[in-house]
Amino acid sequence: MNRFLRDEYLDAMGIQQWVSRERPATTDTLPEDVTITPAAGCGSADEAAVSGLDWPALEDRVARCTRCVLHETRTRTVFGTGKRTADWLIIGEAPGADEDRQGEPFVGRAGQLLTAMLQAIGYARDEVYITNILKCRPPGNRDPLPGEVDCCHDYLERQIKLIGPRLILVVGRIAAQNLLQTDLPIGRLRGSVHRYGDAGIPLVVTYHPAYLLRNPADKAKVWEDLCLAMKTLEAGQPGSQKAD
Ligand code: SF4
């Protein structure tokens, strides 16, 4: 059967399709889980070295990074902020104008809403770690290009290894589709506990706070997602091994 026709049939039946770039997905104990393979890296000459960097060296490497064209237009890199041993890792898409100026992720109105979302579940902003899949702002806030995401990916991967989070909350369609390597709409990615990487870190998807500012009626759905994330954490799913 034609692949596109098959995809349409499966889509119409509500069957999720997962495509791994490196190896097939496996299942685990959670009923609706899917194991996700991280995206491939940039292929840069210094890629291997990134996997051995500690926090200061990693932050310095990102600050000097020229791997993709975004370095030409950035004001500052936006590395990430928060507790470096946090249980919760929040991953968004990319810095916007405010973040590019200040060098911190999720500032401005969307950042205030993210802070309020975290407070609603009992966490202060500095009790979690917050970062993006891209460390530099795409001009005009355009969507990240696949090559840019790939080039930046091993920085995020090293952050995940160093933090060793017990849960990843992905905010927004772009970050979710890139991390899960899928084109499925965010509405189909919400509501399930996915698994990320070799460590199988539980991963929950929700809407980006910037989307919520435009669509406040969907705040109830975000609350559902946060409750799912809390429930997953409380269920005692193992965290990933923190890197030295
Ligand atoms: S977006 Fe990432 S890969 Fe591109 S220049 Fe910035 S830090 Fe480097």
Image (tube, rainbow, N blue to C red):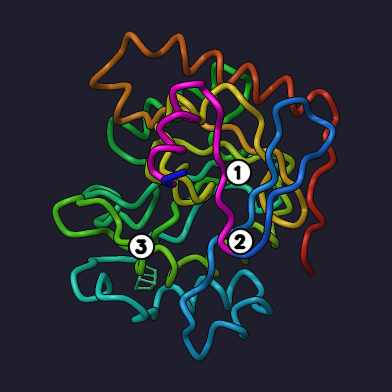
Judging by the rendered image, the residue that carries numbered circle 3 is: 146
Judging by the rendered image, the residue that carries numbered circle 1 is: 89
Residue shown at 70% from the left, 27% from the top: 32
Bin the neighbour count of mark 2 within 10 Å (Cα to Cα): few under 14, some 14-19, many 20 and up. many
Looking at the picture, how far across and down is residue 233, in whole percent? 75, 28
Q: Secondary structure at mark 1?
A: strand
Q: Is mark 3 within 8 Å of ligand 1?
A: no
Q: Residue furthest front?
A: 1
Which one is earlier in the sequence, the residue at label 2 or at label 3?
A: 3
Bin the neighbour count of mark 1 within 10 Å (Cα to Cα): few under 14, some 14-19, many 20 and up. many
Residue 109 - label: none
Q: CA distance from mark 2 to mark 3?
A: 20 Å
Judging by the rendered image, the residue that carries numbered circle 2 is: 159
Q: Which residues are magenta?
A: 3-21
- Amino acid residing under circle 3: Pro
Looking at the picture, how far across and down is residue 25, in whole percent? 69, 49
CB atoms of marks 1 and 2 within 8 Å: yes
Looking at the picture, how far across and down is residue 65, in whole percent? 39, 79
Q: Determine whether, in the image, residue 49 is placed left or right of residue 73.
A: right
Looking at the picture, how far across and down is residue 48, in whole percent? 61, 84
Question: Which quadrant is the C terminus positioned in?
Answer: bottom right
Q: Residue furthest bottom?
A: 45
Q: Determine whether, in the image, residue 241 is placed left or right of residue 158.
A: right
In terms of depth relative to the viewer, which is nearer, 85 or 49? 49
For residue 176, above or below residue 31: below
Which one is earlier in the sequence, the residue at label 1 or at label 3?
A: 1
* Marks 1, 3: nearer the viewer: 3
Q: Determine whether, in the image, residue 67 is placed left or right of residue 14.
A: left
Residue 242 appears in which quarter of the rendering?
bottom right
For residue 117, above or below residue 221: below
